[in-house]
Image (cartoon, rainbow, N blue to C red):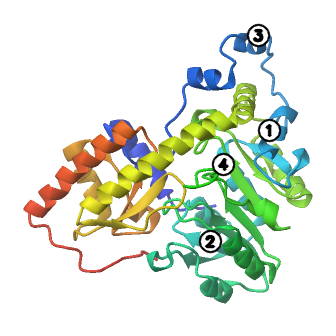
Amino acid sequence: MKIKPFGVEIWMNEFENHCEFNLAETCVASLTVEQLLEMSGKNANVLDDLMPMKLTYGAIEGSDRLRDAICTLYQHQRRDNIVVTHGAIGANALVHETLVEPGDHVISVRPTYQQHYSIPESYGATVDILQLRPENGFLPDLNEFAALIRPETKLVAINNPNNPTGALMDAGYLEKFIEIARSSQAYILCDEVYRGTAQDGDGFSPAIADLYERGISVAGMSKTFSLAGLRLGWIAAGPEIREAVSIHRDYNTISVGMLDDYFAALALESKARILERSHQITRGNLQILDDWVKREPAISYIKPKAGTTALLKYDFDMPSREFCIALLKETGVMFTPGSVLHMEGWLRVGYANSPEILRNGLAKVSGFLRQLNDQGIPAARVEMQVTT
């Protein structure tokens, strides 16, 4: 099996340990173990739980405690609908491995996490891209989707809230999307790893597994819950998918770590305090980013409705990778070039780090933009470029 290089992960691996202001980060600012224990009220007695713990494989499917805690994030899921995985990245890979075969027809939105189009393509599927466009607020065009769907379409992959745009399909929009998929009985895999970060209300958009009988929700502890170091995710789906996925899971997972399981359950049982912190960061920081964009004539964007990232359009005629490398060398600020997301002419900014890092980093970017302008770098010749 041959697969295309994973653009965004290669970029992060190459540069993220060499920057001063990481504005490519996609997680809500990570929690320390101390903060997690304080939020959960476990400071004094956590060792009472950990010291007698025998480090076996643990519960193969994930502990009942953890799966019950995961179910509290959904309206209609129960313990037996949950498959615990090595991160959301492992959950996505398992779903594609389970469902996609050579010759299948798959539809994936783009931009999105590259797993959702490169993995099925590597399995020999025909993958049609449903391009997300700024003129639609980066929401899928329902007419374009209807034109792509076929009677034999096997799987549709979406990302809600979307990475990198921060676009959000609400319940009404999702219902329309589902009706189109239902016409061919296609599965919908919805990567919901940023679910819980909406800019209003409780932060939670509807989950596809709660709305659609062939819906598959994937999520994890990394983004909204600030615990990427646990490397813990899950799949929420009906019995047919759960059983099929579990067969494949036996070959590459066995179980997640017992300590990961323990701390993830602890966090989800304390989710109110963690979510309060996450909302304070994402909502406050988006205002910082929005104010900055309004002050910068060479930068524009579609303001995110959720998530931790935004796509910035820059008004200079230079490749995005060249822009980002020059920015990093000059200022210590790390962005992600749109080229690794098939969105040349754009930049991805992660705005959920600490407010101080965001403010100071954006100030550095402002100086860099002035420098480009003073050097006479020409304005971009096109309004938007989308690499297909």
Residue 232 in view? yes
Of the numbered discs in the image, which one, if any, rests on residue 48?
Answer: 3
List the residue tagged with mark 1: 69
Which residue is identified by label 4? 88
- Dot 1: what SS? helix
Marked residue nearer the N-terminal end (4 or 3): 3
Q: Residues within 10 Å of mark 1 (few under 14, many from 20)?
A: many
Q: Residue at x 58, y 76 (%)?
A: 140
27 sits left or right of 347 in the view: right
Under circle 4, the secondary element is helix
Residue depicted at x 31% and y 60%: 293
Tell me the amino acid under the disc marked 4.
Ala
Residue type, mark 1 in image: Ala
Query: Decide: marks 2, 3 in contact (CB < 8 A)?
Result: no
From what the image shows, is residue 304 above or below residue 361?
A: below
* N-terminal label among 3 and 1: 3
Q: Is residue 162 left or right of residue 22?
A: right
In the image, residue 64 sits, relative to residue 34, either above or below, namely below
Could one spot residue 351 in this view of the protein? no
Residue 382 x, y percent position in the rendering: 29, 80
| Mark identifier at residue 108 | 2
